[in-house]
Image (cartoon, grey):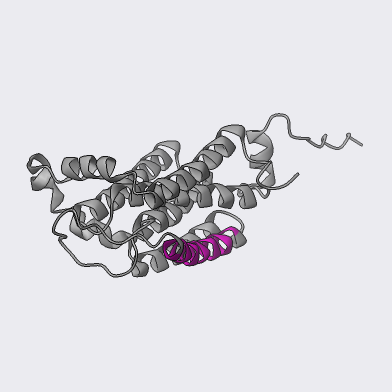
Amino acid sequence: MSPIRSLPRPLLLLALGGALLVIGLAVLVSLEQTRAFDRAIIDAVRTPAIQGLAWVLGPITELGSTWAIILMSAVVFVFAAAIGPWRHGLIGGVVIGLASAANSTFKLLIARERPELFEPVVVERGFSFPSGHSALGMVAYGILAVLVHRSRLPLAARRTIIGLLAVLIVLIGLSRVWLGVHFPTDVLAGWATGGVIVAVYVAFTRRVSPEPAEGAVDADPAAPRSDPPAPG
């Protein structure tokens, strides 16, 4: 059975849905059919009601920048080595690097210009679709969330860390819209692309349990067990 087909059904459906979402958005963007949606979301993100909170989005956007993603690649490797097979961390770092290259290629294929609907807070060069910060943030922090989930940290700690990573991913995407460097559909495509890549990472690393053999058997009552040796 291929690694992708070995994914749990909900995760497989989520990955397929993400891929279809990216393709659908790419088609709609190419046909210039997303302006009304983008404008509505932009107006909501830039409403005066949240301007008092928006100041934090400037620093948060840097957590999706190139230097932060490189740092996260190192964190992923070290964390994976600490909880189980170090090669899971190596695969994670490679996946993050490949995701960056794939995102740059995708931008060239769609060739969407940066937003001109409003005055940007910062100026970014290059094409807009999909958002690289959103995609790579989803990949890097998503893979870290997978490793945290597989770790032996207390359940409450795992849930807290994964929740914080999810909030961070969302805020990085919102920051790109607030700064005026991406359309909301760029961010949605980035999140979806990153989510598919995280699902692929899960597929290629789930065959080897990060837990010791005894823990893996305890976690799966159906797993084969060896009988203790007979006395004498």
**Residue at (39% x, 63% y) in the render:** 111
Judged from this view, the residue extending furthest toward the top is 221
Against 52, residue 217 (above or below) is: above
Viewer-side residue, 202 vs 34: 34
Residue 81 placement (x, y as % from top left)? 55, 61
**Residue numbers of the magenta segment:** 88-108
Q: Is residue 19 visible?
A: yes
Q: Nearer the viewer, residue 206 or 132?
A: 132
The answer to if 103 sits in the magenta stretch is yes
Q: Is residue 161 magenta?
A: no
Rendered position, 220 above or below 98: above
Residue 145 in sight: no
State which quadrant residue 33 falls in.
top left
Q: Residue most toward the right? A: 232
At which x and y percent is residue 147?
50, 50
Residue drawn at 59 percent across, 58 percent down: 88
| Prevailing secondary structure of the magenta residues | helix
- Compared to residue 125, the image places residue 8 above or below, namely above
Q: Which residue occupies 69% across, 29% down? A: 221
84 over 223 or under it: above or below: below
Q: Residue furthest front?
A: 31
Q: In this rendered view, identify the residue nearer to me: 213 or 206.
A: 206
Who is closer to the viewer here, 159 or 129? Answer: 129
Residue 210 placement, left or right of 73: right
Residue 89 percent across, percent down from the top left:
55, 61
Q: Percent position (x, y) of residue 70?
A: 41, 68
**Is the N terminus in the top left, top right, bottom left or bottom right quadrant?**
top right
Kindly identify the residue that appears in the image at 49 percent across and 58 percent down.
Answer: 79
Q: Quadrant of the C terminus?
A: top right
